[in-house]
Each structure stands twice: as structure tokens, then as C-alpha cells.
Image: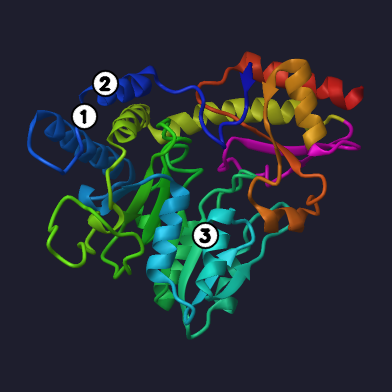
């Protein structure tokens, strides 16, 4: 199998990730629930994972990292914990449903930043959307559909100017490119993509203090006689038994990223991306979506072959060539409406540090054969 679906989850991971999960299953107790050896082992490694993530983004206090099951849970907890129906909120049409659906349910007054024909967010339109009641900007750092990277530095500066809190979805970018905590006020991340961790891991990182409402509560291992649990980080988001097995695996993935460096990982992945893009962009009947004029993008190429739906194309790639891609809507409904690809969907090729040039060449040849067939 040739695996080109790394934006969904990285399949090839450093071997120490699986080894750590296995070790944790055999040796970790329930973190924070007592003081014997297996509990203390879990405590130490969970904290060390916070340290590794803090190092990755330049965060001074590792306790500003809270663990959840996914970026989806993180975004839900943060949005419901901060945003109410009396707030005005800005987001973009490039968002994943993990951002859009919690915002819709919050009942807030919602405005959308549009994007250009290549799916690039038009940050210059931001000031025109700001109202007196605007309190939050919630947006993705990198599109899972186009690979475009949002100019969050400009947006965060504008947010500071207007007193707006920036909640940033770094699901696609954390580990894949350099990400610094100074880019946003709050970051929501997943562990199983560019951080090479296990599925079922993710979290929230905060750049400062925020008055989150309690959305998820129960046993926290401390202050059991208190009517309410702590609202401080990381306790506010860590109700119940932590996934210490997965978090220890995530630690090894983050250590791998820290050791190589996100910029170096991005450079290797973009070599593969560029090889693929140059090989397929001149094929008749193939249309690509995204801004390929800039080097600062994610290793993602979404496309269509004229006369085929995305499901048909992805099906042939798998059945005839054993090439795994992602077809359909990619949980990005507004961007598909923008591209007029609601009915057809798109086929997404997304590359990893563990892919090879030989695999890329086979992908190009397969696409040429199907398009010319």
C-alpha cells in the first residue's frame, strides 16, 4: 500500500510511539489517583509530555497544556467554555466542521472571512467584520483541503488591536511547520497527525489566563469534597481518567518532531509535495485546488479528474494501484461550496515525512494513467 492520507492521520510513525503505548499499557496506573509506583510513573510521563509540547511552541509554563481526546473535543470545550449567544464571532469559510458546528450551536452572531479563488483567506477583510460586540476569532491555521496556511500573524495583530481573543485550530500545522504560542491566545491541537502520536490524543494550549465556563465535569482526582472542580489550567479540561497510554505515545512523537525540527520536517515533506505537483499539474483533465504560488504551504494536493467524481477516482487509485487517498468533502462544507465541488467532492493527496520519492512517482504515473485512460 502507498499511503497518501496523512492529513487524516499519519499511519507511519516513529517506532518508539507504539513501543511507548505498549509499555504504558503494562506499567501505568491511573494518573493523579494515588502515590504508588505505577501511578507516579504515569504522572511523570504525562507531565513530561506537557514539557515536550511546551518546548515545541515556546510556551513557558507546561501546565498551560491540557490534554483531551482530540482537536474536536478541544474546540468544543473551548468554544462552549468561552462563547455565548450574546457574543459576535468571526470565523472563515475554510473551517472544518469541528469549528463550524460548535459555533452554530453556541448561538453566537457569526461572521465569515471569505477567501479568493485559490482558497486563500482574505485577511484584509477582517477589520470590516469587526463589531462592538465582536469578542472572538476562531480559525484554522492550515486548511486540510487546500494546504493553504492562514496569515495568522496578521490576524493576531489585528485581534490585539481590537481586543479580540484568537482561538486557533492547529490540527494540520502543529508538528508540520513551525508553530509558536505567540501566534494565538488559545490553540487546539490533535496528536495523531503531524505530531505522529496515537489516535485519541489532543489538547488545548493557552497563552494567558481565561475564564472558561465548566463544560465537562466530574472526578478529577483532587478536591473531591468541593462542589465544583478547579477552573484553572489544565484541570478545567482534564476531568476523568486521562489517556496516559496514548499521551506517553504522543510524548515520543513530539520528541521526534523536536529532535528533527518542524522546519526540517516541512522541508522534506515539501520536496515530495513539489515533486508530485510538478508531475501532475500538466496532465489534461486534472484540476488542482489551492494556492501553489507560495512555498509556505502544507504538503497537500487536492484535485479532480474531469468526468469523474472524487469517489470514482479514489476508488480506482485504491483498487488498481493500492494508493490510499481521501475523497469527498473533508468536513469542509463551506470551502467546497466556494469551489463548487459539493457534488463531485475532491481527492486529497497528503504527504508525510515517511513517504518516499518512489511512492510519489508511482502516484503520478497512476494519476496519468487514469486521466488519460
Pick the front one: 284 or 22: 22
Check contact, mark 3 vs mark 1: CB within 8 A. Answer: no
Gap between marks 3 and 1 measured at Cα: 36 Å
Quarter the N terminus occupies: top right
Which label sits on residue 118? Answer: none
297 is within the stretch colored magenta: yes
Secondary structure of residue under mark 1? loop
**Quarter of the rendering containing residue 242:** top left
Which label sits on residue 139? Answer: 3
Which label sits on residue 23? Answer: 2
Percent x, y of residue 188: 41, 52
The answer to whether 321 is drawn above or below residue 254 in the figure is: above
Q: Residue at x 51, y 43 (%)?
A: 172
Q: Residue at x 14, y 54 (%)?
A: 222
196 is within the stretch colored magenta: no
Secondary structure of residue under mark 3? strand
Secondary structure of residue under mark 2? helix
Q: Which residue is mark 1?
A: 28
Gap between marks 3 and 2 measured at Cα: 37 Å
Q: Residue furthest left?
A: 35
Percent x, y of residue 328: 72, 42
The answer to whether 104 is drawn above or below residue 195 in the figure is: below
**Quarter of the rendering containing residue 17:** top left
Q: Residues within 10 Å of mark 3 (few under 14, many from 20)?
A: many
The answer to whether 346 is drawn above or below residue 111 in the figure is: above
Q: Is residue 117 visible?
A: no
Q: Earlier in the sequence, mark 3 or mark 1?
A: 1
Q: Earlier in the sequence, mark 2 or mark 1?
A: 2
Left or right of residue 151: residue 185: left
The scheme the figure's colours follow is rainbow
Amino acid at each position: 500500500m502507498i499511503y497518501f492520507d496523512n492529513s487524516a492521520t499519519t499511519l507511519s510513525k516513529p517506532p518508539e510511539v507504539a513501543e511507548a503505548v505498549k509499555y504504558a499499557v503494562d506499567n501505568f496506573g491511573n494518573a493523579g489517583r494515588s502515590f504508588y509506583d505505577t501511578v507516579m510513573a504515569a504522572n511523570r510521563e504525562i507531565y513530561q509530555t506537557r514539557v515536550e509540547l511546551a518546548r515545541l511552541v515556546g510556551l513557558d509554563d507546561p501546565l498551560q497544556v491540557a490534554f483531551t481526546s482530540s482537536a474536536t473535543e478541544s474546540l468544543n470545550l473551548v468554544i462552549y467554555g468561552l462563547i455565548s449567544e450574546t457574543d459576535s464571532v468571526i470565523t472563515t469559510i475554510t473551517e472544518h466542521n469541528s469549528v463550524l458546528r460548535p459555533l452554530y450551536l453556541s448561538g453566537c452572531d457569526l461572521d465569515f472571512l471569505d477567501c479568493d479563488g485559490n482558497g486563500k483567506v482574505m485577511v484584509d477583510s477582517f477589520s470590516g467584520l469587526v463589531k462592538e460586540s465582536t469578542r472572538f476569532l476562531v480559525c484554522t491555521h492550515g486548511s486540510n483541503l487546500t494546504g493553504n496556511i492562514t496569515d495568522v500573524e496578521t490576524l493576531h495583530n489585528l485581534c490585539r488591536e481590537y481586543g479580540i481573543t484568537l482561538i486557533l485550530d492547529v490540527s494540520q500545522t502543529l508538528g508540520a511547520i513551525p508553530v509558536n504560542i505567540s501566534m494565538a491566545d488559545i490553540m487546539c491541537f490533535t496528536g495523531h497527525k503531524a505530531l505522529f502520536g496515537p489516535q485519541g490524543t489532543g489538547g488545548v494550549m493557552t497563552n494567558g489566563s481565561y475564564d472558561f465556563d465548566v463544560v465537562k465535569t466530574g472526578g478529577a482526582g483532587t478536591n473531591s469534597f468541593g462542589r465544583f472542580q478547579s477552573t484553572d489550567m489544565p484541570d478545567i479540561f482534564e476531568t476523568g481518567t486521562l489517556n496516559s497510554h496514548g499521551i506517553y505515545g504522543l510524548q515520543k512523537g513530539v520528541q521526534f518532531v523536536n529532535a528533527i525540527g518542524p522546519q526540517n520536517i516541512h522541508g522534506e515533506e515539501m520536496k515530495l509535495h513539489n515533486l508530485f505537483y510538478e508531475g501532475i499539474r500538466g496532465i489534461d483533465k486534472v484540476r488542482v485546488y489551492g494556492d501553489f504560488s507560495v512555498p509556505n504551504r502544507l504538503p497537500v494536493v487536492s484535485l479532480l479528474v474531469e468526468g469523474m467524481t472524487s469517489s470514482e477516482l479514489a476508488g480506482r487509485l485504491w483498487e488498481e494501484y493500492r494508493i490510499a487517498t481521501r475523497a469527498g468533502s473533508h468536513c469542509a462544507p463551506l470551502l467546497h461550496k466556494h469551489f463548487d465541488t459539493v457534488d463531485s467532492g475532491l481527492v486529497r493527496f497528503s504527504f508525510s515525512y515517511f513517504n518516499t520519492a518512489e511512492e510519489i512517482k508511482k502516484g503520478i504515473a497512476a494519476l496519468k494513467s487514469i486521466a488519460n485512460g
